[in-house]
Each structure stands twice: as structure tokens, then as C-alpha cells.
Image: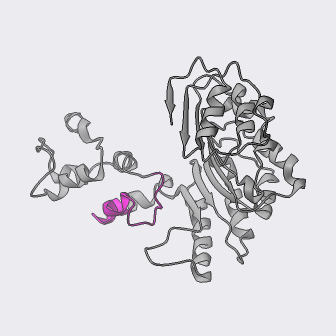
Amino acid sequence: MAVASSLQFTVLRSVQSFTSILFNPLDPPCPRLPLPKRAIILDLPDELLWSIFSRCMDPHASPFSNENPLQPLMKVCVRWRAVILEAPQFWSHISFPGWRRHGKGITPASLKEDEERVGVQVVKSGDVPVTIRLVPVPDYDSKRVVETMLGASTRVAEAEFLFNNDLFKRVSAHAGGFPILQRLNVRLSEALDAEYNAAAAEFFGSLTALKSLSLASDPVGGIDWLPTLVPLSQMWARLRVCELTDCMVDDVLLILPHFSPGTRLSLILGKLRRVEDPKTLPIIDHTNIQSLSFNRCGDHFVETILRNITAPSLQRLAI
């Protein structure tokens, strides 16, 4: 119990503070604390070690990147490396194509390695929630890697997709669904065929756990599927964070009434409008958003939005 009491401070806030205990830097960034002996740290139980290591994880860094904060910890000793590699959370951030070393591009051989790595990560991540990133590569048959990722769909908590027609068809038709998906980042690499409009509405409407949505369109290039999603009032009401890129004034005004109290809305590069006559735009007499930000939006876009809404719950406005 005395040892446990003396280690209450070991919920370390960074890799730097953790490694300073071991390597005793000559010029520490802050005054030294009365730290336990190195042997005590090296003898910590595996469960406690991982609880410390997990706080050093960067949720957006590849497990295989040297920039991942866990990489230096794996080099301390064989036991620490084993503790990290045996933790399913270490394998839970899955990306295709995978992380690339500086200066190294994508090749058929590297894509094959990435495909095999995805399979390993899906297995080793066990039953823990996972984050997936899937970007189709031209002239590469990604059918098998897509199916491997979709096999873990019931565990996907965060996802980033760059959809073309083929990938969207596979993902939207996946029978397993995404029951715990809370955060979704979606872009389109090409305009979706008209036949997929109903599938898009059904897919987004089925994401009952979704809390954060980042959606990018390209209306000038014919990539514009936000109108298909505007009628999904229940989906918009579930969101707590919403980011729309290259959105049109009309669509923004139509979805604003659906947001629930406390929602944060970010509009990026919003400078387009479907109808030329501003008198035809809807007047929104009440919206529940708490935060509204405009990033790289034209003055006319910002003025039109603000002139047509009433937001009594708005606490933050950033332009």
C-alpha cells in the first residue's frame, strides 16, 4: 500500500516527464520532484504500465511512425515493448494507405504491405473500439482491404473516408453497419451517381451514434451531396460538432433549425448560393447552435447567413 501511495503522481502527463525519471536529464525543463527509484518504475505491473502508456498515445499518429510518442518507450526495455505490443489499443488506429516515412511514396509493394498490416491490426486490436482511415488508390484493387476493414465495422468509433462511387457502394451496402460510430470525416473524390442518392440518405440516417460530422463537397466540380442529406433532421439533431466545407448558403439555412442545443457549427469556404435572389432564402427565426465559426468564407456568405438567422443560444461567433 505504501508503494501504491507513493506512485499516485505517476499518471504522467507526457513522454518527456516519464522518460526524465529514467534518464535523469542534465537540464530538466522543471524543478525535480522527489521521484521513486528507477527499479520501482521498471517493476510496475503490466496493467499500471499500460494505463500510463495509454496517456501518451496520440490518437492521430500511426503506431508505426517514429513520431508516435510510444515509440521511444518501446526502446527502453524488452518488457515495456512487450506491454505496448500486447495492448489491443496500440493497434486500434488503422489506415490505408498506411503511414509513410519522409521522402518515400506509395508503390505497389508498399500498398501490399499496408494491406497485410491492416489485417494484422484488425486481429490484434481485439474487441476495442477502432479508428479507420480509408482512401482509395487509383489503379489498385482495394477490394480485400475494404472488406477487412468493414469486418471490424461494429467496433469503429471514428472513421475518415475519401469516397468514390465504388467505395461508397461497398460501405453504404455493408450489412453490419456502424453502431458505435461517433465521429465521421467524409470527402468525395468524384461526383456520386444519381442512383446513390437514396443510399447516401439511408447510410447517414443509420448512424445513430454519430456526434461529430465533417463533410466536404465541391459544387463547382459537380461533387455536391449535401442537398441529399438536408432532409435528415434526426441526423443533424444528433450532432454536437458539425463542419461543412464548400457548403452553400441555402443548405446551411435549411439545416440550422435541426441542430440541438449546444451544437458547434463550423463553415469553411462557404461562398456559394443556389438561388440568385436573396429574397427567396429562408429566414430562420430560431436555431439552437452554441458556436458558429466562419473560416475562409466570403463576406457576402457571412453577411447572408447572419442576416437570415436568429440564434438566442449563441455563445461564440468567430469570423
Which residue is more in the foreground, 298 or 211?
A: 298
The reply to whether the magenta stretch includes residue 56 is no
Given residues 238 and 62, the one toward you in this image is 238
76 within the magenta span: yes
- Residue 86 as seen in the image, left or right of residue 78: right
Question: Residue 44's x, y, as percent?
Answer: 28, 49
Residue at 68% from the left image edge and 67% from the top image edge: 136
- Place of residue 80 in the rendered image (x, y in percent of width and height, measured from the top left): 33, 59
In front: 227, or 33? 227
Task: Judge left or right: residue 196 versus residue 215.
Answer: right
Say whether residue 242 is visible.
Answer: no
**For residue 152, above or below residue 72:** above
Q: Position of residue 130 (x, y in %)?
A: 58, 51
Who's the residue at 62% across and 28% down the image?
Answer: 306
| Left or right of 185, for residue 53 | left
What is the span of residues highlighted in magenta in the rendered image? 59-81
Residue in the image at 32% along x and 48% along y: 45
Q: Residue at x 75, y 37 (%)?
A: 250
Please give the count of numbered marks on the rendered protein: 0
